[in-house]
Amino acid sequence: MRGFARRLLARRFWALALKELRQIRRDRRLTVSLIVPPVLQVLLFGFALDSEVRNLRLGVVDESRTAESRELISVLTQNATFQLVGAYATPAALGEALATARLDVGVVIPYHFARMRMRGQPATVQVLLNAANANTAQISQGYVEGAVAWLNRDLAGARAAPVELRAAFIYNPGLVNAWFIVTGVFGTLIILNGSLVSAATMIREKERGTVEQLLMTPASALEVVLAKLVPLFLLLMTMVALVLTVARLVFDVPFRGNPLLLLAACGGCVLTGIGLGTFISTVARSANQTQLISFFVNPPLALLSGGLTPIEAMPKWVQPLTLLNPIAHFAKIARSVLVKGAGLDVVYPDLLALLALAALLVGVSAWRFRRQLS
Amino acid sequence: MRRILAQARKELTQIRRDRLALALTLVLPLALVALMGTSVSLTVTDIPIVIQDLDQTPLSRQYADAFRGSLMFRVVTLPPAMAPEAMLATGRVRAAVIIPEHFAREIRRGRPAEAQVLVDATDGNTARLTRGGAGQVTQAFARQVAPERARPPIQTATRLWFNPGRESSKFYGPGFMVLALSIFPPVLAALAMSREGEQQTILQVYVSSISAHEYLLGKILAGMVTGLTQCLLSVGLMFTLFGLRFAGDPMPLVAGSVLFVFCAVAFGTLVGAAIPNQAAAVQAVALGGFLLSFLLSGLIFPIENIPDALRWVSSLVHARYYIVIVRDAFLQGGGWPAVWWAELAIGAIGVGYYTLAWRAMRRMQVKA
């Protein structure tokens, strides 16, 4: 062990590491691709992805035309969820507008609406929802029912419902969507950009045939591999710091937990990215092949991570697969530590899994890279 | 015309010989659409919740059973000596329902009883769904225990149109079909074009009698053949795996697909002509195509939620319009009156890309 450490710190290793650093620094495209895409992506994702349901276009057919029916309409359009865009004469015209996507929700208030209510009989209002988007439909159905229930409570006066459920949102009471998206996308950014950059630096030696020159140096294969990994790791950790700064300053993501814990997870994530990139570069023959191969790897990795959509919403047979996805573990850690303020006692299974995946990927790819060297 | 066809044939032969490219055009897109379309969904079922019953009466247990009976929730038992908040903190449950003491007594006395639900709002969307679902369970329970008091003066009868089962895959399947079509055909086109620049075979084109328009159209035609094949296979997937049928007139989809594939391939050709380096060109198309069509086309989250400063960009993204056409064809069936504007927009963007590609090509010639 001691001998290994001494060898690690030998001048030969530093010379090689310095060579890598200089090469990376001189490659302007690589430096740019370490800074610009991650920052741009985290901004784009954070701003553009918002699952909140609001400004749904509402159309009404008011056959009743009474103060009561107008009251119902005004209750529905009170908050930002629905936006009244038109009144239609017949339900058929309303249906037509729904089918041509000019409306999201339609409400039909029957002719007898006011009279039924005066007689104390229940009046039924028809709600037509464009359910093509299942999520929007489910949430807007909840809103319509909530608005009607609110009106009912008002009308019933003292006759309050026998059981009420009061909801309290914890950890993110404002339901800020960016907190979910930014913490979810973070791991994807680290791994995808990390693998891209490391694949690019690894494949360069192969394409230019400078691998032989490395072989001629007195350095051992292990030293060559390590000297390649260490500068990349440092550079990618700088990128991590940059993205974290954006998350904090632009999106106001809370940093409730231990920052060291998060950094450890980031380190594991960066190593996984490097391992993945190196692995791809050992399979590919040229730079553009590494790009094409990453098409097979990246989209499933990014989308089946629970970063953007909840894992629980995936089919049962897909859910166990996410255990093999480093991004899924990282997203869980990032959310627990940043938003919930969780400690090591909560996140250790995910942290261990992430580090194990990192060790596996780096090990396999370093082994393959060494085999190429000799 | 003959020269265009000859150019297209040459391109197709090149694609056929490249096994990786062939996998990229036909196998990968379909696998991606099948996997993503079925897996990506925002609507969680089986949300794990925990119930803390401080009342311990038959009525409170009946209320807890209402949650157990609901398809939306899965009730996890609360370990002894563990607070529901701790379960939330470890992430083992998404919500905790707390039934207070004297719950049953209040109900029997005719006073409103109040239960509480603590919802982990890290994921805002799931939190909203949880609140809605828990509210519905409570209303149903209220109707059960006190039918005379729970009958509201106004009732709603909700009809879910176009996707009555609220199946997410019927919405995301067509969406990912569009995503795959806006990535892979342009990547191939960019590869084919930048290869000519990288290997300098473009010089052979300059000395031949083919004109710039004929050359470009030949390349785009070849790209369209592979793109439309992919499109056809994807539609087949929609019919089989996703159980979708044409909801109305399929003609807008046919016209839209031809226009869209033209537009996508022209975009790829433009990038390939502008960047004569295969790796860089592919990266540019992947970043541009994937990010823009993933984020700004309304694939997963509604476009209306994008802040104004960014939203105008989405009106330049061709996938945004095609997604409207595909979803209309499979779900709403509104036909031409619903989508004519989207077809026009794709056509206009396509012509724009073609013109830019042609100009980029002329610049390449000047440099060479």
Image (tube, coloured by chain):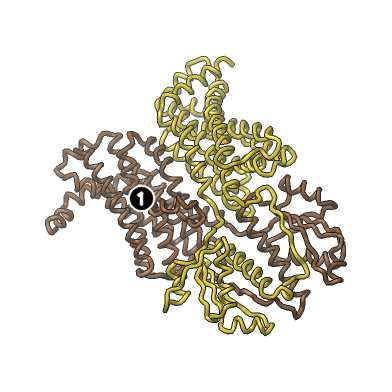
Chain colours: A brown, B yellow
Label 1 secondary element: helix
Residue, x 50% and y 36% (percent of image)? B184
Mark 1: amino acid: Gly
Image side of residue A99 versus residue B367, left or right: right
Image side of residue B152 versus residue B114, left or right: right
Q: Which of B37 and A110 is in front in this view?
A: A110
Task: Read off the residue under disc 1.
Answer: A273
Instruction: Please tell me how many numbered marks the rendered image carries.
Output: 1
Residue B16 lies, with reference to residue B122, above or below; the image says above
* Residue B234 coordinates in the image, percent (x, y): 55, 36
* Residue A325 coordinates in the image, percent (x, y): 39, 52
Which residue lies most toward the left here?
A3
Residue, x 62% and y 78% (percent of image)? B114
Examine the rendering and report whether any part of residue A265 can be seen.
yes
Residue A359 lies, with reference to residue B283, above or below; the image says below
Residue, x 56% and y 68% (percent of image)? B67
* Residue B133 coordinates in the image, percent (x, y): 60, 64
* Residue A62 coordinates in the image, percent (x, y): 83, 58
Label 1 neighbourhood size at 10 Å, few (<14), some (14-19), many (20+)?
Answer: many
